[in-house]
Amino acid sequence: MSNLGQFDSDFYQSNYTIDNQEQSRNDSNAYENLYGSRKQQASEQPQPAFVPPEMLMPSGYAGQFFQPGSNLDYYSQSPYSDNFDEEPPLLEELGINFDHIWQKTLTVLNPLKAADGSIMNETDLAGPILFCIALGATLLLAGKVQFGYVYGMSAIGCLGICALLNLMSSSGVSYGCVASVLGYCLLPMVILSSCAIFFSLQGTVGTVSALIIIGWCSLSASKIFISALDMEGQQLLIAYPCALLYGLFALLTVF
């Protein structure tokens, strides 16, 4: 039993005394006093007053949040706006000039009118394509499906006339210019094919009308060629192959 009592006394023996307990209690009280004084100082500091958002905005800003105001002076002084104003119209960039088309059409319709070489010496295919389609459409209305012959003879005829003009003239001419002139001079043939819709051309009246239209087309084409290529005195030499080409279109129209 003595050994057991000694074991219990040894087991519960510790360095912790009542003095240590009082010291820890004093430390905790000091910490609470320090924390409480800091909390009181923080509560005594003045809080910032409420400021409306309108007062925080700059006086010169008239837009809304996350929406920047437009600066008209910047866009008016931008160099890109001047570039858009200086650009030519889209039709002129594509090579379509209605004024030139109208002048060329009037030149073809009036064989006695002097041709402007500066306008005629252009690769303008808008009018010729339109007249070829019109010729094929009028032939179709007359009961003749000849679109392939119209396009084929036009391409081969332009090649032949282009080679002939390059041999006869010193300046030379491009294939596009020849195709443009021959296409515009196809307009009288469209008038003849339009007449074939209402009455038959297989007779004396039709033959005479076809000869007049062939002479009209070849005379207009040769006049434009000698004006654009400075080939004075050679109009008959150019009109003859042109008459052969337009004679083929007349055969399609009459028969």
Image (cartoon, helix red, strand yellow):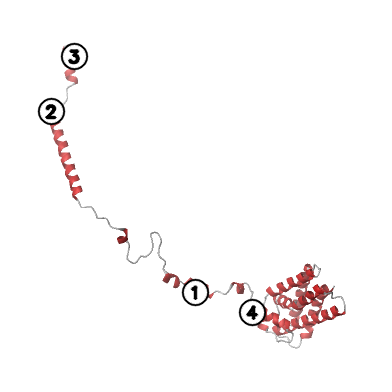
**Quick one: SS at disc 4?**
helix
Residue 176 in the image: above or below residue 53: below
7 versus 168 height, above or below: above
Give the CA separation, mark 4 to mark 1: 26 Å
In primary-sequence order, the first of circles 4 and 3 is 3
User: What's the mark number on residue 99?
Assistant: 4
Q: Is the residue under label 3 in contact with that under label 2 (CB below 8 Å)?
A: no
Q: Which mark is residue 133?
A: none
Q: Earlier in the sequence, mark 2 or mark 4?
A: 2
Q: In this orientation, does residue 171 appear?
A: no
Residue carrying label 2 = 18
Q: Are marks 3 and 1 in contact (CB under 8 Å)?
A: no
Look at label 2 and name its amino acid.
Ile
Question: Would residue 141 be visible to someone looking at this image?
Answer: yes
- Residue on which the image places disc 3: 4
Give the distance between the C-alpha atoms of the residues marked 1 and 2, in whole angstroms. Answer: 96 Å
Q: Quadrant of residue 226?
A: bottom right
Residue that numbered label 1 is attached to: 82
Q: Which dot, 4 or 3, sits closer to the camera? A: 4
As drawn, the residue found furthest toward the bottom would be 233
Q: Nearer the viewer, mark 2 or mark 4?
A: 4
84 with respect to 244 (left or right) = left
- Residue 62 position within the rendered picture, expressed as x and y whole percent measured from the top left: 37, 65
Q: Residue drawn 73% across and 74% down?
A: 131
Q: Residue at x 16, y 19 (%)?
A: 9
